[in-house]
Image: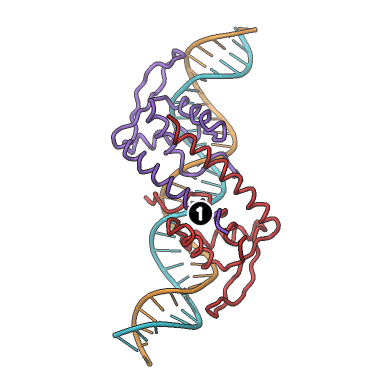
Chain colours: A purple, B red, C orange, D cyan
Amino acid sequence: MSRPSDMIQGTLDLLILKTISIEPKHGWAIAKRIEQVSEEALQITQGALYPALHRLEQQGWITAEWRETDTGREAKFYRLTKAGAKQLKQELAQWERLSNAIGLVIRAV
Amino acid sequence: MSRPSDMIQGTLDLLILKTISIEPKHGWAIAKRIEQVSEEALQITQGALYPALHRLEQQGWITAEWRETDTGREAKFYRLTKAGAKQLKQELAQWERLSNAIGLVIRAV
DNA sequence: CAATCATGCCTAAGTTACTTATACATCGCG
DNA sequence: CGCGATGTATAAGTAACTTAGGCATGATTG
């Protein structure tokens, strides 16, 4: 038992891609940003975050580079690739399509 | 490889509960109804449907009864229990909360 | 009248993306 | 100098799918 969680399965990739599309960030900052923007409704655990980042990197949708953070430590900054931007667009469209569809069902009478 | 699918993981229970909350239905009809109401955006495969129904029944959220369909054949009609109605309410609230949160993230600038 | 499609229920094996738990390192602070 | 915050990472377990079957009956059609 684990549900209900503070995640909708399969949306993490979308959230990550969207977040770094605005500005490259390191993993920890990506998670914090998503949590903050969602008003703490979404919680990104590290066990979900890092595997997702590696997944996205392996797909060629993001690339990593070690840089220094504001706080003066080394961290892996991720940015979108061109393929990643395309993927983001697709995942956004897919999300809109499916979440609207669910809306139709749950508001049906 | 299987994604992207025509499902958002974890929402099938909600869709089923909502659908039979309007009127008891048999499995096959539930799937057809969801597909129709969603304007074919959602596709419910039988491999997802029947395990979900058994899951929900085991949780005590729905109960089954063999009855005759319009087309004159025997089918298992499912209806919501009281606990199921409560569960539906919770899952609706959870969906609203999380899908809104995702909306915040994907519309952030 | 036989074949095929639609209706209806079901299960097994494989995959994916989570959860939970753990490990490790550095920095700032009291 | 210990502890919380910052930062990356992996392993084991699990839930809910996908894919691919199987089975039975009623209706349609060539």
The correct choice, above or below, for D25 with respect to B93 in the image is below
Q: Nearer the viewer, residue B85 or B74?
A: B85
The answer to which image quadrant residue A62 occupies is top left
Q: Nearer the viewer, residue A40 or C9?
A: A40
- Which element is circle 1 on? helix
Residue under pointer 1: A104
Q: Residue at x 47, y 26 (%)?
A: A28
Q: Residue at x 41, y 25 (%)?
A: A25
Q: Chain of mark 1?
A: A
Q: Nearer the viewer, residue A10 or A37?
A: A37
Q: Residue at x 51, y 63 (%)?
A: B33
| Picture coordinates of residue C6, whole percent (x, y) | 43, 74
The correct choice, above or below, for A62 with respect to A103 in the image is above
Query: Furthest residue to the right?
Result: B82
Badge 1 amino acid? Leu
| Picture coordinates of residue B21, whole percent (x, y) | 62, 60
Which quarter of the image is occupied by the C terminus of chain B?
top left
| Picture coordinates of residue A19, whole percent (x, y) | 42, 31
Is residue B63 found left or right of A79 in the rendered image? Answer: right
The correct choice, above or below, for B36 with respect to C15 in the image is below
